[in-house]
Amino acid sequence: MKTLTLQRVAAVDVLRALTMFLMLFVNDIPGLSNIPHWLEHARADEDMLGFSDTIFPAFLFCMGMSVSFAIQNRYKKGDNHLQVVMHIFWRTVALVVMGLFSVNSAGVAGLSHAWFSILMVVGFFLIWGVYPQASGNKKRIFIGMKVAGVVLLGFLMLYKGMHGEPFEQKWWGILGLIGWTYAICAGIYLFTRENLWWNALVWVLFMGLAVLHHADVVTLSFIPSDMTLHTFGMSGLLTSLLMQRYARKEHPEAFISILCILGTMMLIAALLAHPFWIISKIQATPTWLFFCLAAFFPLFGLFYWLTDVKGKAYWFEIIKPAGTATLTCYLIPYLWYSIQQLLGLHYPEILSGGVPGLLKSVVFSLVIVGITGLLVKAKIKLKV
């Protein structure tokens, strides 16, 4: 168990990389014409699980899987309990701040959405960029760059408040939602640690609270974000603990069988919930939760078999940077779209829809991943 715990599991990185790549893709296809409806996000009142509706929860699932490995490795490196708690706290703060800035990037007089986004991302890189170990003047320069990033974000927040709509929590943004789910899952793990049964109990409790909340039986407004989203994170955390206990490369059958059983249970739960709630990502319904988990559990089993058991992780080498520098990969499109808008660049008309448009979005996603890989090689990336 300990050997697997402290090793890097290829399936986790591969699934996270694929999820990030697909997030780039589904974020680029809105606005395309003549594309299959099932690829898109379902409307708020539409009873449908669009392909795009599965990507964000898959990311939360992957994030949950990483929690146990990351915290175990921090303790192994010598961090004490307070240091781990502070790491979780500051990582949450970083993600929530980034999320709030991303949803407040419009509605500023005298500063276009494009320029706000560019300055915002520059601020993120200045504050949370990975700086090399340094001393003396070089260390002071790096500290100054971080301070400059804080000043830049502070300026953007104040400028928006004085020249446009107030800087406020309209919603948490994708990164903010990820941050809150991370905080809750990591906080719970600090208490439950590798105890599989306690984590399973919390997972069941989360599902129950999600159902009760959407049934208007209990009110959970005091918990940031939605209980449904936190359940995706706990599902990933539970999967990682199941893997540490039952997964063996020589005999993966037990672990994969457990995931298939969990997937079947979630499918049954989805069918039972469907008469009461539609499948809706926007409403974060329990039906959406259960149908997604019905796919995620066995899907991870497939990736574990393919990458860790059969050694085919190299099949996904082209998108590897999306799994190892995920936050950097997510933010680069903010710069891409902003520069495109400022320069008035447009794709040829043939790429505005249909198969050519979808291929354009695939190529765009690959280019972003490639740029991320180049930045990582140049030692430029974000880490929170």
Image (cartoon, grey):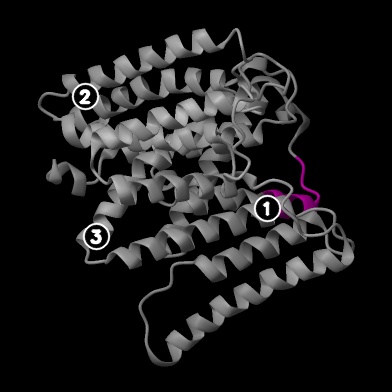
Q: Secondary structure at mark 3?
A: helix
Q: Nearer the viewer, mark 2 or mark 1?
A: 2
Query: Which residue is labeled 1 in the image?
Result: 102
At a point 32% along the width and 31% down the height, the residue shown is 200
Dominant secondary structure, magenta: helix
Three-letter amino acid code of the residue under disc 3: Tyr
Q: Secondary structure at mark 1?
A: helix
Three-letter amino acid code of the residue under disc 2: Phe
Three-letter amino acid code of the residue under disc 1: Ser
**Location of residue 161 (image quadrant):** bottom right
**Location of residue 194 (image quadrant):** top left
Relative side of 302 to 157, left or right:
left
At a point 69% along the width and 20% down the height, the residue shown is 354
Measured Cα–Cα span from mark 3 to mark 2: 26 Å
14, 175: nearer the viewer? 175
Query: Which residue is labeled 2 in the image?
Result: 255
Check if mark 3's residue and mark 2's residue have beta carbons within 8 Å: no
Query: Which residue is labeled 3 in the image?
Result: 75
| Residue 340 located within the stretch drawn in magenta | yes
Residue 330, numbered circle: none
Identify the magenta region: 337-346
At label 3, counting other C-alpha atoms closer than 10 Å, the crowd grade (few under 14, some 14-19, many 20 or more) is few
Q: Residue 178 in the image: x percent, y percent?
A: 52, 45
Q: Secondary structure at mark 2?
A: helix
